[in-house]
Image (tube, grey):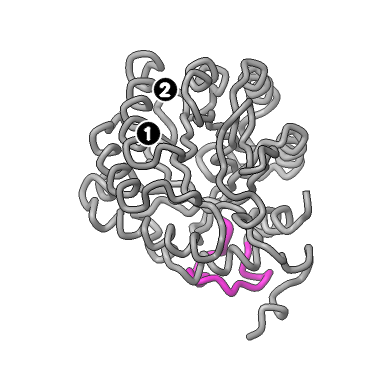
Amino acid sequence: MKLANFLQLGRAKRTSTPFERHGRLAFRAGRLRSADDAAVMLRGVSLFWSQWAPEFYNQRLVHWLAEDWAVDILRIAVAATSPGYLSDPKGEIGKAKTIIDAAISTGIYVLLDWHGHDLETEAARTLFRAIASAYGDCPNIMYETWNEPHSRYSWNEDILPHHLTTLATIREFAPRAPVIWASQDFAGRPDLVAEASILHANVGCSLHFYAGTHREGLRMRTDEALAKGAAVLATEWGLGESDGSGTLDKLEAERWLQFLRARRIGYINWSICDKAETCAALLPGCSADGGWRRSHLSVSGSFVRDDLRRVC
């Protein structure tokens, strides 16, 4: 079936890819910037935990999201758990490479995310070494060295040492890759990351928010990070609550997106899967290969697709 039969609103088909428009990206002077030093606001989506939704880690899906959803960036949530990377590193690396190869071929960016809450620094290093050594300084790839550190971890004693160790591993093979650091409290304190991040070239702060849970307080902490000179990227956000389900709050989501657009902060939605929860983009039983009609999308999925296809 022709793609036109699926498209129901939004902008015209893109005439160039995100990579053709922006080239090599870098965190610099408080923003994510293009090869021409212009501030770049990437928008995209995240895949679900790799061990729980492996069927979505395929090339057809990447091409569909690039064309129909108009994503600039796709986040790979490599599960830092067992089952997951801790029990099957070869399998998880293979999934990541499938998505990276497809992203490069379609001209979008990809964010490799060590997706977990516990401290597993040595295992994270082996993932980043495997990918960075295989792809070198490929300009399509960004790295998120720890998705959401649990609140039981200390910034100075646990989290910052993890970020510094994994950064060194990445830099050995990919010296120009943008790298993103998260704070404790599940990436809810970008203001704490800011002072450390600006001491290291091409490092940005991660921001995670869920419209049903997070409000003005987190926006204020984000502005504090920006005021300190840090670059911020919202690597995970959802329309529901912080557990991925619960109340769906479209009004608060619009407040958040207006806040981010005003500051040219990019954002990546959670998540592309068909799990029966508020933040899942698809209804249960949908194809993992794309080709979705509007009726296949959840309320969250429709909201996100419409936003991504809007010119900002």
Work out whether 128 lies above or below 207.
below
Q: Main secondary structure of the magenta part?
A: loop
Q: Does the magenta segment cover residue 203? A: no
Q: Position of residue 149 (x, y in %)?
A: 40, 28
Which is more toward the observer, 218 or 107? 107
| Amino acid identity at mark 2 | Ser
Q: Position of residue 55 (x, y in %)?
A: 40, 66
Q: Does the magenta segment cover residue 294? A: yes
Residue at position x 72%, y 79% from top?
A: 4
Which is more toward the observer, 170 or 163? 170
In the rendered image, which residue does mark 2 sit on? 151
Give me the C-alpha separation between circle 1 and circle 2. 9 Å
How many C-alpha atoms fall within 10 Å of the one at disc 1: few (<14), some, or many (≥20)? Answer: many
Q: Position of residue 158 (x, y in %)?
A: 33, 20
For residue 117, the mark is: 1
Work out which residue is located at the far front of the displayed protein and give it. 36
Residue at position x 63%, y 64% from top?
A: 297
| Amino acid identity at mark 1 | His
Residue at position x 44%, y 50% from top?
A: 138
Q: Position of residue 208 (x, y in %)?
A: 55, 34
Q: Secondary structure at mark 1?
A: loop
User: In the figure, is residue 269 to the left or right of 103?
Assistant: right
